[in-house]
Amino acid sequence: MVATVNREGALKGRSAVVTGASRGIGEAIAYSLAMEGANVIVSARTVNEGDHPLPGTITKTVETIRSAGGEAYAVQCNLALPEDRANLAEESRKKYGPIDILVNNAAITYFIPTKDFPDKRARLMFEVQVIAAMDLSQRFLPDMVDQGRGHIIYISSGAAIHPTNPSAGGGGGTVYGMCKAAMERFSTGFAAEVYADNIAVNAISPGLVATPGTQLHGLVNESTKSRESPVEAIAEATCFIARSNPKEITGRIDHIQPFMDEFSLENVELIAQIQSYDPSDR
């Protein structure tokens, strides 16, 4: 079956913001939400090919959704800048009105041992992955309260789990794990705060996914294929949460395969294949 957009789908009349949607997991999630009828604000720094060494742009993501019959709009946003975050909220509302789905997916990551980690990069990672996610949640919360419904979804990582074998070495992922752990703790706490407002807050841990970003960092290769998660699974899990009753699925931190199994979800073909990246092209 060829993947299509259903404008009369389960998310008809709803509007979503997806950060980091120029490529990889964010791009896949934008497609999945649009396929169920949502209006999707596609946000990232990369507007045109060549703006970033990795393939993918918000322009291309929007064009793909529109060509399939969906509704999407691109808003450039550097999440490290508070003024850009404010503009994202303003432009999103101007285009589609109140936003009731927010997917905090964007990340910037450096894998460097803590003893060598530059302060500037550590602060940037925390700003983008934690402070920005919290800021956008605050900015769109009034929309969700007024609508009487909302979903906020964080894309986390298994790196948030505390290491149990110190002798295995850290691999330079300590700061990354710290950011993801902070995001998870915020999501569960925030879920409790907004439960009475019929707003769900959840975190999904995708596992190892072959995206341009993980390929750039050398995290995926032939030896990892047996334990990689399909990007379509993360997209479907996110979409499933967004179309669920907020009070029935909230305050959770879920790893992708157990979540898919629990709700008998299957990978859904997307309207476009997520691009891969060959590091040898650099």
Image: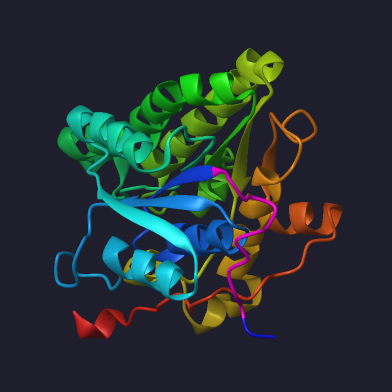
The residue drawn where x is 41% and y is 33% is 133
- Residue 138 x %, y %: 43, 21
Q: In the rendered image of this protein, does residue 144 appear above or below residue 61?
A: above
Report the quarter where the N terminus lies.
bottom right
Visible residue check, residue 145: yes
The residue drawn where x is 82% and y is 58% is 261
Q: Is residue 8 left or right of residue 213?
A: right
User: Which one is nearer the viewer's eye here, 258 or 231?
Assistant: 231
Report the quarter where the C terminus lies.
bottom left
SS assignment for the magenta stretch, majority: loop
- Residue 60 x %, y %: 31, 70
Q: In the rendered image of this protein, does residue 138 appear above or below residue 265?
A: above
Visible residue check, residue 207: no
**How many marks can you see?**
0
Q: Is residue 228 left or right of residue 77?
A: right
- Residue 144 falls within the magenta-colored stretch: no
- Residue 58 x %, y %: 30, 61
The structure's colour scheme is rainbow
Q: Is residue 160 left or right of residue 213?
A: right
The range drawn in magenta is 3-14
The residue drawn where x is 35% and y is 39% is 92
User: Which one is nearer the viewer's eye here, 29 or 4?
Assistant: 4
Where, by quadrant of the figure, is residue 184 drawn?
top right
Q: In the rendered image of this protein, does residue 116 appear above or below residue 228?
A: above
The residue drawn where x is 25% and y is 85% is 280
- Residue 139 x %, y %: 39, 24
